[in-house]
Image: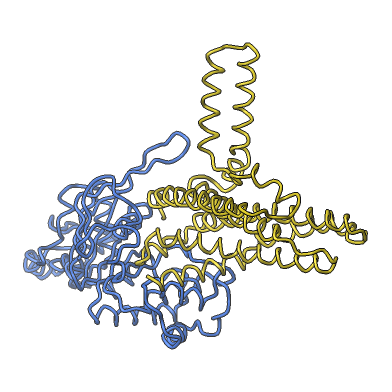
Chain colours: A blue, B yellow
Amino acid sequence: MIRAENVRVNFRTGFMRRQIQALRGLTLEVREGDFLALVGQNGAGKSTAMYCFLGLLKPTSGKIEVLGSVPDLGRPVCRKIAYLPEEPHYHLYLTVEEATRYYASLYGRRVSDKAIHDTLERLGLAPFRDLRLSKCSKGMKQKVGIAQCLIHETQLLFLDEPTRGLDPLAVRSFRETLREIHQRGATIIMNSHVLSEIEMLANRVAIIDSGRVVAQDDLRNFLTADREQYCVTFESNGSVPDYLTSLERHGNLVKGVIPKEKLYDFMELTRNGALPLHECSLKKTSLEDKFFRIVSAGHEPEAAEPVSQSR
Amino acid sequence: MAELWRANIAAHLAFYRRSRLLLAFLILFAVLTALEFVPQLFVSSGVQNFNTLREIFSTLNFFLKLFAAGLGLFIVSAHLRNRSLKMVFTKPCPPAVWLGSAFVSALIVAFLLNAMVLSGLAVLSLLWHIPVRSGLLFISADTFVASIGIAAYLMVLATLLHPALAAIVAIVFNADMFYEGFVWARSSIRAGNHSPGLRVLESVFHFLYLAAPIIHPFEKKTENIYSSLRVMHGEWNYLLYSLGYALALSAFCYFIALAFLQRRRHI
């Protein structure tokens, strides 16, 4: 559905035309039906990558194919695409209803009043239908953006920080809507800093750092890659085994992580030494842990490999 | 495709209707015209009334041309500056349609304003018992034709430059200025200054004069109409020639603006 190969994007900014490398060889593949989350620090290149997929930005080098063609402005294949921008750069002089109708009409077909009404109703925008976007709060503008994504049944959705500015109820409702759209068969690409949200929604994750994809895999592989380890807490008699890592000591209380293959040895050690064992549990990894580990590990080439082979 | 044009034109017309900047310009022009002419409305003499009518018409038409420039400039620069075009171009609406519809919308507004001014002046003419002359229609149509070229030219500048710079370029670098430069350089050469730099300057000014858009390409041929408000047989043709020039200029400007619009980063 989307294939990006070694994409580089360079900008020149400022009076001295200083060059900034926004993407430095980004390679990514999105399969049909994926719910891919692009994760990375600010300025990592997530939005730039999305702009390239949408044709808003031409790569300096590299190849991009979206739905079988090279992305460009306003091309017919955009009929299958919906996009929710990060910043509410909408037509602020239009009212909520006019904007929703306008964006829906840009797909080249007239939208019925009922469809507009239902969408506004569903997002809680109906009471504000005559309010100009310039007078709307950020959250309401975001809902207008969501409305224009939902009004047509598109195959490919690009969402750039979609829940930014939304109230908790709207976030929950939006999540449900995204799940429905994904179950319907749509492919979704979402930029987000809310890693807990990604864990709830996405089925694939790509971590971008300094303009490159440093890790990409199925979410479950990200979350289970470290499940071969155990967290233990016990009272030590002074010495600790060398396979115990991530050590934390509080007096004679020791916390650490042991690999699965050393579990039997560790149990023997505690039993033979009569060391009180307070905890021994399968280690749970969150996407946040994984993200921090990968990003703080630097940009070693091997990090760009999948966390585990899932295809 | 028809739906795309309809939706875009409706949105652009909403922009014009709600633009406070354009409204401010409209009010300013109305106030300036009123300040200049209200005292003269109370003078009742046939000749005086005719002259007043002609001057009001001329002033309003000048403002209409300025306003047309604003229509072309603001529609493009406002959308580029608030970066809302990414919402349009990520849908199956190509830049060609958006730009074309912006141009058509500007012409619709310019046409309506021209029609309002013409109707107002026709009513005033009737109130003062001055026969409504065909010159009013000619000048109004000529102003509208000029507005076509002006709006298109300002659209190109708006895609390239900051709106303030675009306005300065449009005001300063025009055909009249280059023509004056050309006449000055030629007179200096004829007066005996044979420096090579001056000859180069003469050629440059001549080229720029030929290349720069002209608001009224047949100004000399139609100046009698502007003074007498009468149109002689055959003079209507100049309107057609002007229209041809304005359309050619607009087409040229459209393609240049489109090329720049497609090259811009809409992010």
On the question of residue A221 being in view, the answer is yes
Question: Of residues B261 and A242, which is closer to you in this image?
Answer: B261
Quarter containing the C terminus of chain A: bottom left
Q: Position of residue A169 (x, y in %)?
A: 44, 81
**Quarter-wise, where is residue A236 in the image?**
bottom left
Quarter containing the N terminus of chain A: bottom left
**Quarter-wise, where is residue A64 in the image?**
bottom left
**Quarter-wise, where is residue A103 in the image?**
bottom left
Question: Of residues B8 and A47, which is closer to you in this image?
Answer: B8
Report whether B184 appears left or right of A19.
right
Above or below B63: residue A157: below
Question: Of residues A148 and B71, which is closer to you in this image?
Answer: B71
Q: Position of residue A301 (x, y in %)?
A: 17, 47
Q: Position of residue B24 (x, y in %)?
A: 70, 59
Report whether A18 appears left or right of A49.
right
Q: Position of residue B26 (x, y in %)?
A: 70, 60
* Residue beneath the point at 57% across and 68% down: A134
On the question of residue A276 being in view, the answer is no
